[in-house]
Amino acid sequence: MSLLVTGLSRLVTNDPSLGEGPLGVIEDAAVVFEDATVAWAGPASRAPEADRVHDEGGRAAIPGFVDSHAHLVFAGDRTAEFDARMSGTPYTAGGIRTTVAATRAASDAELSANVARLVAEALRQGTTVIECKSGYGLTVEDEARSLRIAGEHTDEVTYLGAHVVPAGLDADAYVGLVTGPMLERCAPYARWVDVFCERGAFDGEQARAVLEAGVKRGLVPRVHANQLGHGPGVRLAVELGAASADHCTHLDDADVDALASGETVATLLPGAEFSTRSPYPDARRLLDAGATVALSTDCNPGSSFTTSMPFCVAVAVREMGMTPDEAVWAATMGGARALRRTDVGRIAPGARADLVLLDAPSHVHLAYRPGVPLVSAVWRRGERVV
Ligand SMILES: [Zn+2]
């Protein structure tokens, strides 16, 4: 079954061979889906015939957002922690460990329903691919359960047993668990292995052990790196050929050079800085050096409780030195690169038919009209889902 979506005032394809500039923008465009795949994209005046036709009457369209960094398997509520942080009063009740306790106590059905709710919320805002990490279980059984539940909702599942050291455990002993029995039990459910490489979490040697053990079990590394301070995470990620180094807030010149010359994508998560009143990463510096930049939500109940990629685009433009074009690319194609996917993040023949319509004449409105729900329709795998 073929479908022609026409009347697109501006279509971002992310394929420079199809249109103007790095975003491959086509004015007065149309797209043809053949079942779940893009069969054709180009000027509406040259569109081929199709079984069905949708005329969108002059709205802009972009590829579905690819959110390559999210922590969706959790239970519990941390409103009070956020409220206290924003009110300037100290909050002492345990951060991630609060969520770990609530997650362990929740049933499978409760956890799965929470993931489903957040995935649906993201979809309504144009996200058609979302990665999901474990990391609030921190026992062999609770991590495996988190990954199994994540896998019910997405193909991009990441083993993050090395999120924090559980209360009362020695860090090296816990790394032994994460790289041993926990990995054995969890690897079948995951595509990726991740580690929180940060002072107070896992140091460079521990992070290396976690990632190398994961690689041996067939997982591909990605790293929480250089979020709260400068550390070895970014360079370790590049050295090990990680798909992505995530956060990248505190970088020295050698980190920037490494990201610019390696294959590792720099994934920036402005929701985390927004929600903790912290300085933003310098996207401009990374882009000017030649690094590949992705934008993601880091959706989690503690430090960034948003599923909104349009919000991340707007903040990245306003606070991180990105142009609207760069931010939209980073939130679509950048995310696809960070997940090593070639089938999503672009609208071109052979790509997955994931298209987002905006109630606006241009993709620039995502930054120009912050906080406005511009996503008016979403197709995923050729099916209208919003
Ligand atoms: Zn994270």
Image (tube, rainbow, N blue to C red):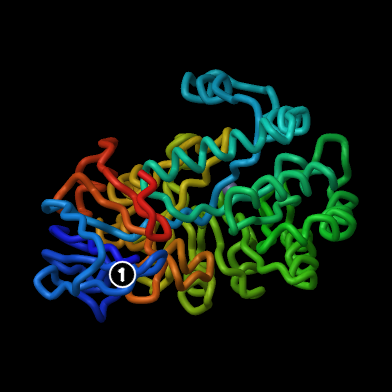
Residue 242 in which image quadrant: bottom right
> Going by the image, does 213 lie left or right of 192?
right
* Near-viewer residue (179 or 336): 336
> Which secondary structure, mark 1?
loop
* Tally of numbered tags: 1
- Inspect this view and state whether residue 258 appears: yes
Q: Label 1: which residue? A: 14
- Inspect this view and state whether residue 228 appears: no
- How far across and down, in percent of the image, does residue 135 sit? 70, 45
- How far across and down, in percent of the image, does residue 303 sit? 54, 37
Who's the residue at 57% across and 33% down the image? 301
Residue 40 in which image quadrant: bottom left
Amino acid type shown at disc 1: Asn
Who's the residue at 66% across and 62% down the image? 192
Other-residue count near label 1 (Cα within 10 Å), few / some / many at <14 / 14–19 / ≥20: many
60 w.r.t. 349: above or below: above
Q: Quadrant of the N terminus?
A: bottom left
Q: Quadrant of the C terminus?
A: top left
- How far across and down, in percent of the image, does residue 31 sit? 24, 66
Who's the residue at 67% across and 55% down the image? 197
